[in-house]
Image (cartoon, grey):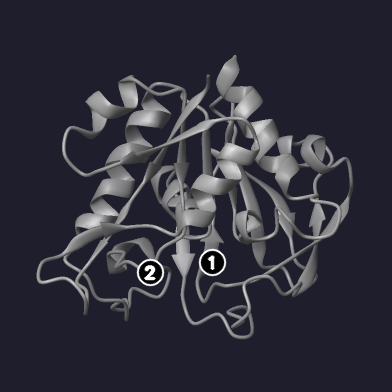
Amino acid sequence: MVKIGVVLGSKDSSFAKDPHYSMEIRYFEALEKAGAVAVPVIYSNIEKQLNELDGLLLPGGDFSTPADYYVEHKNNPYKDNGSWFNAFMQAGKFALDNNMPVLGICAGMQTLAVLLDGKLKMGLEGHRLEDNKQIAHSIKIKEDSHLFDIFNSFEIEVNSIHSEAVAEVNGNIDIVAVTDEGVIEAIESKEHDFVLGVQWHPECLVDHENQEQLKMFEYFVNKCRM
């Protein structure tokens, strides 16, 4: 059985005395629907944990990213103790260094962009909708890409729950989907067998109509079997 790690989040809480790990169940359910075992990844001994796994999912999350990774060089408005971002970076770097299949979603995509020497931008208007199941806009997909192989289409409709995005890429990154207004919606690594980042949240849409977004997780799981 394919085992895929999901890096957890870590925040203070109103219901717990101490900081705790947490992550939306929907990421785990989407991987399980696609035929994998979803394994939580905590912040200690990350490399040892990933050595036992077949792939890595970097999910979404509102964590603080250092200002140097932005084109604006502003202070990020999100507040946490830094461990969440650091864990994403450590897990992502290990996966990239070892050519492990990686799927990054929203903040997970942005982490991949940073690891591949890209830059981010904040303050994106009109892309953070309240309803995570609401279809927000369409995206245009590049033909020669894993993303095109997944959907077999030049255009699909997606949801939108983000206020930041990838702003700049270099030769390590292939932009494989954009909105009509030019917002980068998906990236792939040119240096790895399968490293895909998507800005929308496919895990929220695996039950939507014809379950089109489940194809992404099934494709990812198959890459992890190789």
Mark 2 surroundings: few (<14), some (14-19) or many (≥20) residues within 10 A = some
**Residue 112 appears in view:** yes
- Whole-Å distance between the Cαs marked 2 and 1? 13 Å
Q: Position of residue 96 (x, y in %)?
A: 42, 30
The residue that appears at 38% across and 57% down in the rendered structure is 23
For residue 190, what is the image quadrant?
A: top right
Q: Is residue 101 above or below residue 44?
A: above
Q: Nearer the viewer, mark 2 or mark 1?
A: 2
Which residue is under mark 1?
A: 165
For residue 221, what is the image quadrant?
A: top right
Residue at the farthest left position: 17
**Residue 196 appears in view:** no
> Between 151 and 3, which is closer to the camera in this rendering?
3
* In the displayed structure image, the side of residue 151 where residue 22 appears, left or right: left
Which one is earlier in the sequence, the residue at label 2 or at label 1? 2
The residue that appears at 50% across and 71% down in the rendered structure is 164
**Element marked by disc 1:** strand
